[in-house]
Image: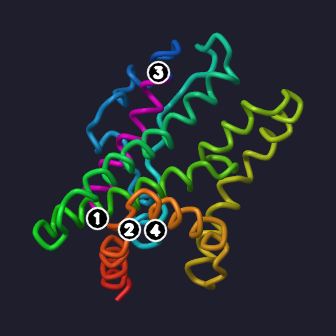
Amino acid sequence: MIPVVLFSLTAHEYSHGRIAFLLGDNTAQRLGRLSFNPLKHLDPIGTLFFYFMGFGWAKPVPVDPGNFDRPRRDMMYVAIAGPLCNLALAVACSFFIRIIEPYDSWVLFTLLSFGVYINVALAIFNLLPIFPLDGSSVIKGLVPVSVAARLGQMDRFGAFILMGVILLDHFAHTGILGVVLWVPIITAVQFLSQDAFPDLYNVLRISFSTISG
């Protein structure tokens, strides 16, 4: 799972930086973050969370909205680029997973299974409308300026709320994220994988059982 997680997180962050660059902000390029080198984007804690809890994050790509012609709109485009990149990767992996025989190429099938699941999970998780996730910037780009300003005032609490929910889910088994995310994630994975879903689900079940054990 680790190489898939690293590549998916790297592609996600690179997409943010690339779209920002195309829209006029070269901050990520100047700081060496416009790169496919995973070490440039790796957040150790976020990667451990992904490995042990199923959700995680990379080090955010720096963006200066002051370099955009229309900061609120362009920040929305930058934010949505990451989840869209993960969705594209999930679609690509799902294409190949449906044309190979899992028991003839089990290692490849396992990598592709994680490719579908991890990228779908990253896309949906990051679209939650809470700072510092991408969904927060997307929402601010869609609502009126006055509403966006009020949402921005709540950003300083977002990371603490999100971390608290994740920790409660893990240690107190509250299932909050599971209720919100599991159904859309597994529905999207099933839709993308089609007939290969039973084998894909078996790979995920065995792998996460091994990790938790």
Mark nearer the N terminus (4 vs 1): 1
Q: Mark 2 near mark 4, Cβ–Cβ under 8 Å?
A: no
- Magenta part of the protein: which range? 1-19
Q: CA distance from mark 2 to mark 1?
A: 8 Å
Instruction: Report x, y in % for residue 137.
Output: 67, 37
For the point 42% across and 53% down, the residue is 119
Q: CA distance from mark 4 to mark 1?
A: 11 Å
Q: Which residue is mark 2?
A: 51
Instruction: Report x, y in % for residue 6.
Output: 31, 52
Q: Which residue is mark 4?
A: 54
Task: From this view, report whether residue 208 is shown above or below residue 121.
Answer: below
Name the residue type under label 1. Answer: Met
Q: CA distance from mark 2 to mark 3?
A: 30 Å
Q: Which mark is residue 27?
A: 3
Q: Mark 3 near mark 1, Cβ–Cβ under 8 Å?
A: no
Mark nearer the N terminus (3 vs 4): 3
Mark 1 crowdedness (10 Å alpha carbons): few <14, some 14-19, many ≥20: some
Which residue, as the protein is rendered here, is positioned at the far left?
A: 104
Name the residue type under label 4. Answer: Gly
Mark nearer the N terminus (2 vs 1): 1
Q: Mark 2 near mark 1, Cβ–Cβ under 8 Å?
A: yes
For the point 39% across and 50% down, the residue is 90
Q: In the picture, residue 80 is in which quadrant? A: top right
Quadrant of the image containing the C terminus: bottom left
Mark nearer the N terminus (2 vs 3): 3
Instruction: Report x, y in % for residue 164.
Output: 66, 68
Name the residue type under label 2. Answer: Tyr
Q: Which residue is mark 1?
A: 1
Mark 4 crowdedness (10 Å alpha carbons): few <14, some 14-19, many ≥20: some
